[in-house]
Image (cartoon, helix red, strand yellow):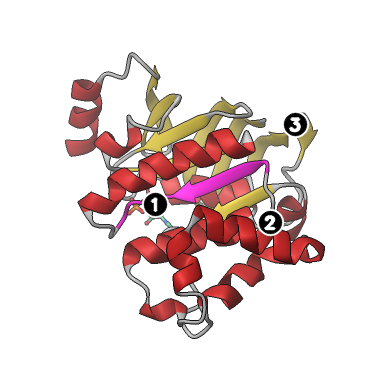
Amino acid sequence: MLSVKNLYVAYGQSEIIHGISFEAKQGEIVAIMGRNGMGKTTLMKSLIGINRARSGHIELNNEDITELPTYMRVKNGVAYVPQGRQIFSSLTVEENILTGMEYTLDKKEELLTNAYNMFPVLFDMSTRKGGNLSGGQQQQLAIARALVAEPKVLILDEPTEGIQPSIIKDMARMLNQIKVMHNLTIVVSEQVLNFTVNIADRLYVMESGNFIHEDVRGSIDEKKITSYLSV
Ligand SMILES: Nc1ncnc2c1ncn2[C@@H]1O[C@H](COP(=O)(O)OP(=O)(O)OP(=O)(O)O)[C@@H](O)[C@H]1O
Ligand SMILES: [Mg+2]
């Protein structure tokens, strides 16, 4: 379980996240929606340790990880799929996946097999350069690279950005499957509501670094959220 308590994050003098709190339980997808520039990436980066907290706490299974550097968080079971995917375009698909195995390389064959079973297109393209993949294929590659670290918590920053609508549906199915298969905690930032309602167990709307709205699965107020996202 990931627990965020009264988190403040700033770039220099400019405070972006103003005291956010939420929990994401094991086997649960928590979605954070918000328009451009509202602080989603700033929050996601603080969960993986790229941004440091100014104050507040981040706990992983009741252990405080607020001061841990990124590599230690990865080691402790937090994986991150950045906005824009950040695939290594000159490495092959398989080499890209292997970069996620820094702490799990002893299980290389098993993890590769699992990744290819989950994403058959990556098996078909395993020797192709990452840069030659479509947006949807790159997103699958980025998720595969994160999963081979065997995380407990997976952080996804705007996974549907730049992905064709037809593929977005597949991605929702895939994330629901991953959540169940690995009993994973997933925190995802998004702007696409019809994708998010298909995956979110809990949904927050973020505006200027604060949560201004919260819904749970089954009672997601799509009209209200649409208005927040289109202001
Ligand atoms: N490295 C940085 N230094 C200073 N300010 C930054 C930095 N990165 C982001 N910001 C500012 O922080 C605010 C939040 O940006 P952030 O990237 O977190 O938003 P976002 O919700 O992820 O937006 P988008 O949907 O466009 O990805 C913006 O005002 C942005 O200009
Ligand atoms: Mg962002």
In the image, farthest residue toward the top = 219
| SS label for mark 3 | loop
Q: Nearer the viewer, residue 166 or 139?
A: 166
The reply to whether discs 3 and 1 touch (Cβ–Cβ < 8 Å) is: no
Q: Residue at x 46, y 42 (%)?
A: 175
Q: Which residues are magenta?
A: 152-161
Dots 1, 2 in contact, CB < 8 A: no
For mark 1, does the 10 Å Cα neighbourhood hold few (<14), some (14 to 19), or many (20 or more) residues? many
**Residue count near mark 3 (Cα–Cα under 10 Å), binned few <14, some 14–19, many ≥20:** few
Residue marked by disc 1: 159
Q: Position of residue 136 (x, y in %)?
A: 34, 61
Q: What residue does disc 2 label?
A: 149
* Residue type, label 3: Asn
Q: Which is more N-terminal, label 1 or label 3?
A: 3
31 vs 155, left or right, is left
Q: Residue at x 76, y 51 (%)?
A: 68
Q: Which mark is residue 167?
A: none
User: Which structural element holds mark 1?
Assistant: loop
Where on the picture, by quarter, is residue 173?
top left
The residue positioned farthest toward the bottom in the image shown? 90
Helix, strand or loop at mark 2: loop
Dot label at residue 61: 3
Mark 3 vs mark 1, CA separation in Å: 25 Å
